[in-house]
Each structure stands twice: as structure tokens, then as C-alpha cells.
């Protein structure tokens, strides 16, 4: 079982003079599905980007710990799987090539069987050798889940995970979220009631203005 | 980190072969710039000092037309976030630097060949000095261009900002390299050129160290 934890200490973010949120404190540890909700512009995407170490907070900090040892920012990317509508894969490569490239740049082994399993799960196995630019927006969204899961990260962060997905795609995502939530930290930032129903606790961002 | 950086370079290399973001613009710029110089000279023979100066002018502007692509293409395609999620900042910088380094060396090698074939006074008397200048100059050019590309990738007016920001940063390097190239034309010895060589070596070391230290801040908003 994972002994991973994410702790937020007095986290605040400003864009210029505009306050997005302030004084957010939480601890997410070991496993579970945690939600982040709030109206448009409340800072859901900003918060998940800070948690993933992609942007810096204006004040306060996020601490990632694995077995009580703090993870340095330089190494954080290999512990996180991230899905969002604004994530873009390399369209000039096929899905298979993209995943192979990601493994090599991450410095982790390319587990072909595991990746084939996910390609089947997200109904992309028959199109794996096609260039990503030929994919529909729903297919690209499903590809992003394989991108997030392929290196077995301890933390999965899904920002609006079901956007662009049809019912079949949503079903696959919910299955993955439930399954991964049993052993890992899964964070969902969304306004969709069905997405948030999966969460054991939900952070309401309008409370942090 | 070296293996990961090399993988990132390979990704950029294959991406470049498929998209031709930088290669086409660099090749076109080399052809256009040298053609314009040749047309403006006509039948006249230009001095070796002018030839040496124009050699580095073409190198500078060719670098301006293509090297920014390393980061700008990621930003324009929206893949910067993907890159942030798969690699550490130092891996990203190293990978992009290897790509730009190879691009700079190959394009400047072609420029040198064209110059030696078309310009009468492009006669190198001290070849080892020319080679050292060429290598050190290209390293400095690649390092400075890569970090400037990372800075301007996030800005709105990328096209104009790149040469504007590059000019003051690259000026000491270009001026010293022009001087060293002229020394190599004159047959000046290494001993007599050591002051200029020390400037270029110092420039490369400082630029490389500062780039690695700065990149983390540039890479994350």
C-alpha cells in the first residue's frame, strides 16, 4: 500500500492583484478519492497545477511525502499522473510512439503489456499506430488517461476528467478512478455531480476567497 | 539525466523531421542571406575583414530565424505542460540544448563551406584557431539562444522579442568571434589570441552555468 501524502500549508494564489484562493489547508494521505469543486474561475485548475508542481503558489506550500521522505520538486513528475482538457499530446506521433517517448524521457521502462491493457480498456488498441492528430477530441482525452497511468504514479490528478467523453468513455474513467482510489491518491477537480459522487471528501473552493 | 535528455533530443529530432519547423526556415535564411550579400557585392572583391564580419552576421541572423523553435514550437502546440509532466527542468534544458547545439553546428558548418567556396578572401591561415573559435562560438550561440528561447516562449510577441533580446546578450560573443576569425585569417598565433579566447571560454561557462540556474524559474510560471 502507498504511504504517500500530500499536505497543503496555507496555500494562496494571486494572479496579479486578483486573489484566486487563500489559506487552503488539507492533508491527503495513502489512498482515496478527493474532490475539488467550485464555480468557473474559482481556481480548480490552478490548484491542481500547484499540487502537481506545475506552477508555484503565491504563498504557502504543497509538500509531497513518500514514506515520510519529502520529494524534491526535481523528482516530482514521476510520482504524478495528470489528465486535463488543456493537456496536449504530440500530434505528429502515433499513440504508441507518444507513449514510448514519454517512457524514455521519464526514464522508466516501457511496459508494452500494461500499455496494451490500457489501450484496450480505453478502446484505442485498434488505432494505436495512427497519428494523434487524426484522433477525435474524445479519443485524445482517453489517450491522456493512458499517459497518466502508464508509469504507475502514486498520485493521479484528474482535472475535468470526463470532458469530451461519451458514456462508454465515462464508464471506463469511473472504473479506473474507483480501482486506483483503493490504493492511490486520486484527485478530481470538477463541477460534474457524477464525478464528485466518487469522492470521499470534496474541497469547496468558494470557501477560500 | 543524460539518457533522459538524449531521449528528449531524439523526440525533438524526429518531430523536426516530420514537421520541418526549424530546418526549412534555417535553410531558406542561409540561401537568402548569402545570395543578398553576393548580389550586393557584384564583381567587387571584399576584404578579408569584411568577409569575416559578414560570416558572423549570417550566423547570427540564421540563429535568430531558427533556434527559438526549440521552445516556441512546444508553446505554440500547447505541449509545454506535457513536457513539464514527463521531465525535470534540467532534463528539458539539456535535451533542448543538445538539439540546438547540433542544429547550430550543422548550419554553421554549411555556412562555412559556402563561404569558403564563394568568397575569395575567406582564406584561413591558422586553421586550428579558426576551428577553436568556430566550436566555442557555436557553443556560446547555442546556449544563449536556448535560454533566450525559453524566456521568450511565454511572451506574446515572440518573433520580435527574440532578436531584440538576443542582440545585447550575444553581442560580446559575436564581436569576439569576429576578432578571432580575423586573427585566423591573418595567421595570428594562439599565444597572441589568448585574451579573446579567454573571453569566449568565459562567456560559454558563465552562460551555461547561469542558464541551468535560471531555467527552473523560467520553466515554471
Image: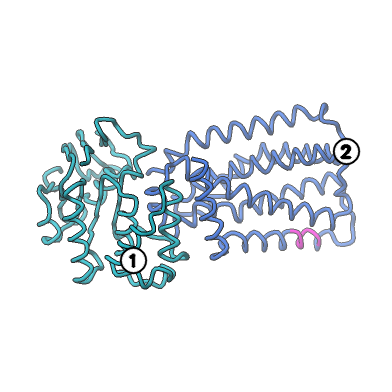
Left or right side of A81 for B208: right
The residue that appears at 83% across and 37% down in the rendered structure is B183
Quadrant where the N terminus of chain A is found in the figure = top left
Q: Which residue is mark 1?
A: A140
Residue B78, position in %: x, y? 40, 58
**Residue A6 visible in the displayed image:** no
Closest to the observer, B16 or A168: A168
Colour assigned to chain A in the rendering is cyan
Which chain does the numbered disc 1 sit on?
Answer: A
The residue that appears at 47% across and 65% down in the rendered structure is A92
The residue that appears at 61% across and 52% down in the rendered structure is B64
* Kind of element beneath mark 1: helix
Above or below, A68 against B216 in this view is above
Which chain does the numbered disc 2 sit on?
Answer: B
Q: Which residue is mark 2?
A: B186
Magenta range is B34-38
Chain letter tied to blue: B
Left or right side of A169 for B70: right
Query: Which quadrant of the structure image shows residue B168?
Result: top right
**Residue B195 visible in the displayed image:** yes
Query: Separation of disc 1 and disc 2 at Cα?
Result: 60 Å
Amino acid at each position: 500500500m502507498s504511504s504517500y501524502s500530500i499536505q497543503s500549508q496555507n496555500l494562496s494564489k494571486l494572479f496579479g492583484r486578483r486573489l484566486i484562493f487563500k489559506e487552503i489547508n488539507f492533508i491527503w494521505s495513502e489512498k482515496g478519492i478527493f474532490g475539488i469543486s467550485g464555480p468557473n474561475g474559482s481556481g480548480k485548475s490552478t490548484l491542481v497545477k500547484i499540487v502537481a508542481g506545475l506552477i508555484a503558489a503565491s504563498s504557502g506550500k504543497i509538500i509531497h511525502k513518500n514514506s515520510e521522505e519529502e520529494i524534491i520538486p526535481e523528482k516530482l513528475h514521476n510520482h504524478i499522473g495528470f489528465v486535463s482538457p488543456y493537456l496536449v499530446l504530440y500530434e505528429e506521433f502515433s499513440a504508441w510512439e507518444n507513449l514510448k517517448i514519454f517512457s524514455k524521457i521519464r526514464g522508466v521502462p516501457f511496459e508494452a503489456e500494461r500499455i496494451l491493457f490500457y489501450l484496450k480498456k480505453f478502446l484505442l488498441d485498434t488505432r494505436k499506430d495512427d497519428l494523434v492528430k487524426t484522433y477525435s477530441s474524445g479519443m485524445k482525452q482517453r489517450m491522456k488517461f493512458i499517459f497518466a497511468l502508464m508509469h504507475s504514479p502514486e498520485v493521479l490528478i484528474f482535472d475535468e476528467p470526463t470532458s469530451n467523453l461519451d458514456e462508454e468513455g465515462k464508464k471506463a474513467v469511473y472504473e479506473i478512478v474507483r480501482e486506483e482510489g483503493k490504493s492511490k491518491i486520486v484527485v478530481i477537480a470538477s463541477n460534474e455531480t457524477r464525478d464528485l459522487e466518487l469522492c470521499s471528501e470534496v474541497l469547496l473552493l468558494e470557501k477560500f476567497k | 539525466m543524460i539518457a533522459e535528455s538524449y531521449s528528449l533530443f531524439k523526440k525533438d529530432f524526429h518531430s523536426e523531421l516530420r514537421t520541418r519547423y526549424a530546418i526549412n526556415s534555417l535553410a531558406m535564411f542561409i540561401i537568402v542571406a548569402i545570395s543578398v550579400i553576393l548580389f550586393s557585392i557584384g564583381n567587387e572583391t571584399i576584404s578579408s575583414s569584411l568577409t569575416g564580419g559578414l560570416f558572423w552576421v549570417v550566423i547570427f541572423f540564421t540563429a535568430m530565424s531558427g533556434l527559438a523553435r526549440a521552445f516556441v514550437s512546444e508553446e505554440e502546440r500547447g505541449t509545454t505542460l506535457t513536457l513539464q509532466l514527463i521531465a525535470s527542468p534540467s532534463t528539458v534544458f539539456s535535451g533542448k540544448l543538445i538539439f540546438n547545439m547540433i542544429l547550430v553546428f550543422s548550419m554553421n558548418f554549411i555556412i562555412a563551406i559556402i563561404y569558403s567556396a564563394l568568397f575569395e578572401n575567406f582564406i584561413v591561415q591558422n586553421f586550428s584557431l579558426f576551428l577553436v573559435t568556430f566550436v566555442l562560438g557555436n557553443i556560446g550561440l547555442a546556449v544563449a539562444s536556448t535560454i533566450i528561447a525559453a524566456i521568450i516562449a511565454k511572451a506574446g510577441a515572440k518573433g520580435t522579442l527574440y532578436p531584440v533580446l538576443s542582440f545585447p546578450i550575444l553581442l560580446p560573443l559575436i564581436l569576439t568571434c569576429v576578432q578571432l576569425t580575423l586573427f585566423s585569417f591573418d595567421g595570428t598565433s594562439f599565444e597572441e589570441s589568448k585574451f579573446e579566447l579567454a573571453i569566449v571560454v568565459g562567456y560559454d561557462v558563465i552562460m551555461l552555468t547561469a542558464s541551468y540556474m535560471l531555467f527552473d524559474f523560467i520553466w515554471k510560471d
